[in-house]
Image: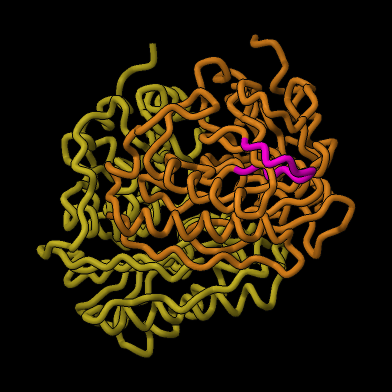
Chain colours: A yellow, B orange
Amino acid sequence: MIHWPVPEPEIPAGTHPALAAVARAAVAAFRDARGRFDRTQLAEKVDMGADGTPTTRLDQLVDTAVAETVDAHRVNLISEEIGVIDNGSAVTLVVDPVDGTSNAVAGVPFSAFAGVVAVDGEAVESLTTWLDTGRSWHAKAGETLPYRTTGRRELDGAAVSLLRPHPKSEDAWLRVSRRAGRVRVLSSSCLEAALVAEGSLDAFADPGSDTHRIMDIAAAAVLLPAAGGALIDAYGRPVEIDPDLSRRWSGIAAATPDLAEELAEEINRPSS
Amino acid sequence: MIHWPVPEPEIPAGTHPALAAVARAAVAAFRDARGRFDRTQLAEKVDMGADGTPTTRLDQLVDTAVAETVDAHRVNLISEEIGVIDNGSAVTLVVDPVDGTSNAVAGVPFSAFAGVVAVDGEAVESLTTWLDTGRSWHAKAGETLPYRTTGRRELDGAAVSLLRPHPKSEDAWLRVSRRAGRVRVLSSSCLEAALVAEGSLDAFADPGSDTHRIMDIAAAAVLLPAAGGALIDAYGRPVEIDPDLSRRWSGIAAATPDLAEELAEEINRPSS
């Protein structure tokens, strides 16, 4: 069993009621699952998710709690495992109930709830909650935050977090890591993006493996611009909220648009 | 400024009084430094450490608090920045006041206090405290712990945390990462070793860059065996408590001695 506590989330006043309720439900379900199941049971593949990847027991329990809360609030949902729930609302929540699932089931204390409020398809608000501590990052599109990114523009010497190297992205991974002053692999994209937003990392990137689904980067797409940064796709594709869960991106969250573009350029450079 | 709180450390009853006092002093100094200085000021190189690497303002403040406490308890100290303090005691504390300094000064929430009690040169007790949450791991040599490692013996498919790739270790880094099922770079060796001890990671390694000093691996050398795991050097050198701070190791903390040896073998394999 993972014996560490799961604290209450620190959800700021002014958070959309449905988003706040879903975050609380996700944290409660996460805590309950940790209390009832050991690491092996949490990690057990119990189903196939709507996004085409296997669903762990932990994912299933937390996603179910999210879906019930969404139904109670009569809003729509786009979620990793459950897929799409259409309650006929103009409001859709785009939710990653457990971002960093492999950390969460193993006990590596770095996993998150992340959710976005979209109105008529437009992302207007985001909430990212670090499940292991309750720390939260909340943003509304068009409003500035009390914290900022580092403002860094150059990749050389930057503090960069990356997805682990994948066979198809290993060359780009190495090129970025050689130029970076610091390299991290924390394996929770939503938390890594939050660390970029608050100025603890200069950038986070999937260096071209097209691992990201919309729920992995939707919160960052609201949070980063509000903190002076940027969230782009390495291959220039628009980051759109779309119920088609087969779509993938290689997200880049960076302290500035310049740094995001420099990372994209390095990721796109042909291997020598 | 990094605005997150630094909680009180959870130090178990039975911890050596000098070690407990030093841990509390380190956490208090860390909290104070975070409250007074911003990221740039915390990271400023203010001196050259006894280990030959630059000392940040954060390191200096926390090390000074550690040295004062050691003097008050009339024990000896081996520490990264201060070096060696000989108070003529049979007890020496081997301390890394801030493990993961680059995380700590940037605000990435993975840094630790780590300390070991050595009696007549033999490590007998360790304490690792995650500065960002207060979580602590305490062990005494020859006593078993209430938690265990994963017990994993094979590298293929294992969850492995690594130091970032360095030019001299890049080939080994890639070979290990290709065989691992999960790869992390958390950049706090003491915390990564604690995660191996509690069964959240299968292994942590410096894949051959000889970055570790004794204070980076001394706590793991007590903690890992007490949890059923192992702490070895990739090149087979004994991990000894030695006031010569120019010595370096490539530490491997693993769930089992077999896994540690398999990692060492892969790190030592000639590049193809």
Front-most of B54 and A155? B54
Position of residue B162 measured from the top left corner of the image (x, y, whole percent)? 59, 35
Residue A246, percent across and down?
A: 40, 52
Image: B237 above or below B231: above
Quarter of the picture containing the C terminus of chain B is: top right
Inspect this view and state whether residue B131 appears: yes
- The boundaries of the magenta stretch are B85-95
Quadrant placement of the N terminus of chain B: bottom left
At 87% from the left and 57% from the top, the residue drawn is B143
Q: Is residue A205 left or right of residue B151?
A: left
| Quarter occupied by residue B44 | top left
Q: Say above or below: B163 vs A73.
A: above
Residue A251 appears in the figure: no
Marker count (numbered): 0
Residue B37, horizontal then vertical, whole percent? 29, 51
The answer to whether residue A38 is magenta is no
Residue sitting at x 51%, y 31%: B164
